[in-house]
Amino acid sequence: MKKATIIIFCITAIIGIVVSLIGNIQKKTLKDAIASTLNVESSKLVLNLPPKNVRYPGTILSPNRSSLMVYTAGNLDDESMLKGERFSIEAVVNDMSNVQASGQNTLINSAFSNGEQLEVMLNIKDAYIAELPVGVLKERINSNDLVRAAMKKEIDPIIVSRAYVGKVEYVIRALSEAGIEALVDMSKTAYNTRKTRLGSFKFSDNIEGRKEISFSIESPIIFAYEVMEASRVATDLSDEGELALNELSARRLKEIREENVLRDQTTRKTFGAVTIANAHYENYGSLNVPQAKEASGLMSQFFESYNPAFVKQFNSSKEKPITDDNLLDWSIDLTLDLLENPVDHLVVYYTGHGLSLPNGEIVLLQGNVNKDYAERAAQSYNPSSSESGDGLILVEQLYNAIAMTNVPFTLIIDACYPNDEMADALTRVSMLLGDKEGNELYYVGDNALITDELSDIGKVMRQIGNRFEYRQQDNAVIFSSKPGAKSVFKPNPIDPYGLDLPPLAARILSFHDHIDGNGRKTNLADVIRKSTDSVNGLGEISLNGSITWSNLEVMRGSLREPE
């Protein structure tokens, strides 16, 4: 460690000398300016401007060209992290080339179009280099099951070997009176718009009449980083020479540069579908639910009618119930498949039993759950994650497992989850669950207070949903019943003489023969939306029906075919 620290000090001392000699530097591209100041080859740097999260040393990313999936994230506070001495960078830049998703309508690009009148200065302050020893990088790779599985399938992830951290500021400076006029014009015509679009930046105020304007990212960011192939780190590198990690193949660089390439919007959108049925419980026979397997099969057929790229089923059987480990392992295989064959959207339908924990999170009961353990969990369990082999999977765990595919998705949970918090709220506002199914509310309080008390129910409903960040993301999670309500089987719309079905499956399948006003099959996104009664926690006058706290616009955009 001491040796590494000394080497870093030497490197950064050299950097300090380079910085002190900048003076009248020539204009360069942003990337070349950073590379020359750091005394590294430009081809070895990947710029992170605008900044993306999770580019710390030790972060392992997929090689997928369309989007970099994060296998595992590093952390700057890692006790193994090596950090060099502080330094600064100051450079005049003449364009934003090599900047990911830089856009074409920023203040900076406006300045570049007035190159003879304005100059753009890049100032990076309080900067330092951060990296991990090779031995630690090897350990990160070898301890990650998903990464090792990918490498066995000849998918070679990349690992961040070094990061450059600092506070970034841009200064647009007038070089003449005409330049001052250009700044004034920019402030009048573009400032407010640009300020809104670059909301993460802090702008200098009172632009008019000044010779320069500046805007900065207030917190330290990773403004550049280097990566290596995981296979090379794992097999070729020695554990010695922690700072000899400046390797980046041209192939990898090209893939990263094209990370944000948009797909041709005129091509047909593709989606994949997955149905999961947890119908068999080896330690809890009274929970066996054949209706779940029936729903999985019918939902698969329904998805097939929309010509998906694929439909996959993962159903339990008496001989082979689905355990928590089985389900998470299966999600890894799904991730690897989608790395090789990505789609525009993934729809996942899950059915089985669930329960609500004291913290309001929902747990899905797996085939290996123990009855006594589940009952105790419902009373006292308040986890951030469940443990392997306990037969419980948090909905958030399933959500995160699917998110590893890095494909936009919709997760449909067709399971009930009794909720004590909602029951307490109903008692508090003088309402009872009076019907056999437990979905209708009967008010027994003061009629003069009914409006306020109904509003209180809605407030509790929103609090339960908003407590968990994953439920409010663009990847939608839709629940078949509202907190506290029973998820009661409904008649089978496909086979009236067949098994009844979980409510959301019955609801969705009722659209199997529907057509729209143009005589076409009702769009899948519209079917899912019409099957969701309460969106974003609104409209909860009763406990009847399904609910989501998520934004459904991504689903509707991904699944809806062009007109």
Image: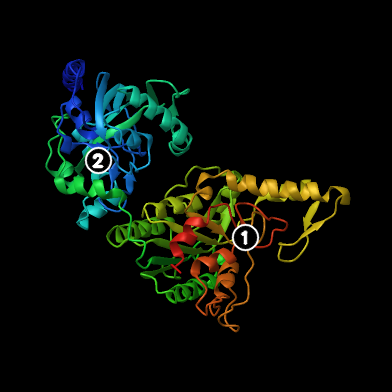
- Residue 406 lies, in percent from the top left, at 36, 53
Q: Secondary structure at mark 2?
A: loop
Q: Position of residue 527 (x, y in %)?
A: 54, 69
Left or right? Give the position of 354 relative to 258: right
Q: Pointer 2: what residue?
A: 98
Between 533 and 287, which is closer to the camera in this rendering?
A: 533
Quarter in which the N terminus is drawn: top left
SS at mark 1 in the image: loop
- Inspect the image, locate mark 2, and give the three-letter code of the amino acid beneath it: Asn
Horizontally, residue 32 falls left or right of residue 333, namely left
Q: Give neighbour class at mark 1: few <14, some 14-19, many 20+ (Cα, 10 Å).
A: many
Counting residues from the start of the chain, the first of labels 1 and 2 encountered is: 2
Residue 230 locus on image (x, y percent): 20, 45
Which label sits in the foreground, 1 or 2? 2
Q: Which residue is mark 1?
A: 481
Q: Which mark is residue 289?
A: none
In the displayed image of the protein, which residue is found farthest to the front? 178
Q: Is residue 165 shown above or below 404?
A: above
Q: Which one is in front, 5 or 532? A: 532
Left or right of 188 on screen, residue 46: left
Residue at 36 percent of width and 60 percent of height: 330
Identity of the residue drawn at 47% across and 45% down: 385
Corner quadrant of residue 106: top left
Cα distance between the residues tagged 1 and 2: 48 Å
